[in-house]
């Protein structure tokens, strides 16, 4: 199985983000429409702000092999302290990739949510 790498989205990563959210095939199951560039830019700014809130939570670029962008993955804590896990796959990728959440993220979430 191919190794995967996670890295939080940073300001220079808009092209990877927009690659997914501007794709009609990808967005058909999410919002039923591809996002225009201005709306995607606004949403991307929200992603960057959310990524600053917690070290281990946020929206990540998921890379396979030699740093090839294959999906977006989010582990987010909502205002009501509920966790949301989301993954959006790059349509050109057909290989199955398993995404494992490290124990530190789960442990941190449990402490934050007072479990």
Image (spheres, grey):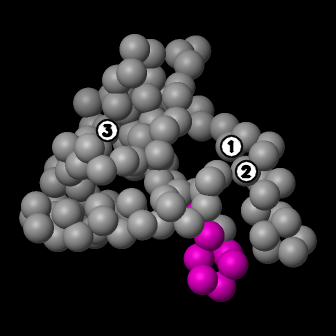
Residue depicted at x 19% and y 63%: 41
Closer to the chain start, of discs 1 and 3, is: 3
Residue 59 in percent (x, y) is at 47, 54
Residue 68 image-quadrant placement: top left
Q: Which residue is mark 2?
A: 105
Residue 8 percent coordinates (x, y): 47, 46
Q: Quadrant of the N terminus?
A: top right
Q: Main secondary structure of the magenta part?
A: loop
Q: Examine the structure image and report whether residue 3 is included in the region drawn in magenta.
A: no
Place of residue 5 in the rendered image (x, y in percent of width and height, measured from the top left): 52, 28
Q: Is residue 80 magenta?
A: yes
Secondary structure beneath label 3: loop
Which circle, 2 or 1, is nearer the viewer? 2
Q: Nearer the viewer, mark 1 or mark 3?
A: 1
| Above or below for 32 versus 100 | below
Question: SS class of the residue under badge 2?
Answer: helix
Q: Residue at x 79, y 73 (%)?
A: 113
Does residue 33 lie above or below 96 as drawn? Answer: below
Mark pair 2, 3: CA separation: 24 Å
Mark 2 and mark 1 residues within 8 Å of each other at the beta carbon? yes
């Amino acid at each position: 199985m191919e190794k995967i790498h996670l890295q939080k989205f940073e300001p220079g990563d808009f092209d990877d983000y927009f690659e997914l959210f501007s794709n009609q095939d990808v967005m058909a199951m999410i919002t039923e429409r591809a996002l225009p560039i201005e709306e995607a830019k606004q949403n991307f700014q929200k992603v960057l702000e959310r990524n600053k809130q917690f070290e281990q939570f946020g929206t990540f670029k998921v890379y396979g092999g030699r740093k090839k962008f294959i999906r977006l993955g989010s582990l987010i804590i909502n205002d009501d302290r509920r966790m949301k896990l989301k993954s959006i796959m790059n349509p050109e990728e057909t290989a199955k990739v398993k995404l494992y959440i490290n124990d530190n993220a789960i442990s941190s979430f449990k402490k934050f949510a007072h479990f």
